[in-house]
Amino acid sequence: MPHLTEPHLTEDEVLQAARGGRGPGRHADGLPGTRRAHLNGCASCADRVSGTRNLADALRAAEPEVRPPSFDALIAPALAAERAAPAAESAPPTLTASGAARLAATLVLRQARLVPASLWPLTAAGIAVLFVFAWQAPDPSVGAAFFGPAATLLTTGAALAVCSPRRDPRSEMLHAMRVPPAVVWLARLVLVLGAVLAALAVASAASAAVLGAPQDTAALIASWLGPAALGVGMTVFGTVWRSPAVGAAFGAGSWFMSVLGSRGAAQPGSLPSGTRDTIGALWSTTPLSLAVSAVLLAAAVWLVSRPDRSLGEG
């Protein structure tokens, strides 16, 4: 018989036959056709294959199948403990009230470097001209009437000069700071508006002193504080929402309405009563005008904190 002249199965072939095989030209025992014929006719090779199968069955019955543990069961608990330990050991220090005050002061003072250099002298010159006009006006009432719209215009212009976050050459750096960009932007706006409003308050007190009558300092400040706050709110919101051009248009419209409202109050018959009352409630120093200004500024801060969002987007 030809198969008896062939060599016996190798150890690999015995293991292969014991396990069984798959693939073209292979039978259930995993051997090609020629080696299968040898196995069928060779008792020695058949005994070796049978013994190997019995040994494998005995080992499988005695020892369960060993499976490696999953990543979550083996590594994840150790990583979680390692990450939690440094966080508990190096907790950030609590910011005290004095530390917060120093941080806010430092932040505000550093924003002075980003203010346009021409803003301060132009604003000072405008306030000086305003005071001189009120002082030299032939009629004190004319100077007092001119003071409010002019102060509103100065405040709105100062806000427009510094409220656009896109004009800041360091805007990308702001988003890499630990302090939120909206806080940095708001600090700059507060710095400029605080300085302008303080200077206008001093000029109002000086103008009231030289005018002698018909208005005292509080009344003169009230003539421009509400319209200025509303003009700033509309200017800042329009600039952050769309562009400086839109902010300038909003500010100009607010200033025009404040002038119209003051003239309507001086000349009761020039405007319908409903229109005059609405303009007077918004473009004067009233709780309503201050509340609307606060809402507009809050909306602008919200938009600055989300530069990829605007109210015009979905």
Image (cartoon, helix red, strand yellow):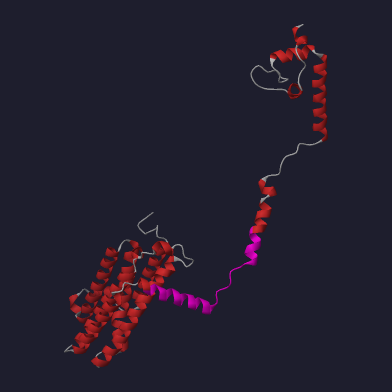
The main secondary structure of the magenta stretch is helix
* Quarter where residue 188 is shown: bottom left
Q: Is 284 located above or below residue 244 in the figure?
A: below
Q: Is 203 located above or below residue 118 in the figure?
A: below
Q: Is residue 99 magenta?
A: yes
Q: Nearer the viewer, residue 232 or 10?
A: 10
Q: Nearer the viewer, residue 143 or 280?
A: 143
Q: Is 121 located above or below residue 298 in the figure?
A: below
Residue 124 rendering spot, x and y as whole percentages: 28, 81
Confirm whether residue 285 shows in the render.
no
The residue lying at 28 percent from left, 73 percent from top is 157
Confirm whether residue 6 shows in the render.
yes
Residue 104 rendering spot, x and y as whole percentages: 46, 75
Q: Is residue 277 left or right of residue 101?
A: left
Q: Is residue 150 magenta?
A: no
Work out which quarter of the rendered image holds the C terminus and state it: bottom left
* Quarter where residue 85 is shown: bottom right
Q: Is 145 located above or below residue 164 in the figure?
A: below
Q: Which residues are magenta?
A: 83-112
The residue lying at 26 percent from left, 66 percent from top is 249
Residue 253 rendering spot, x and y as whole percentages: 25, 69
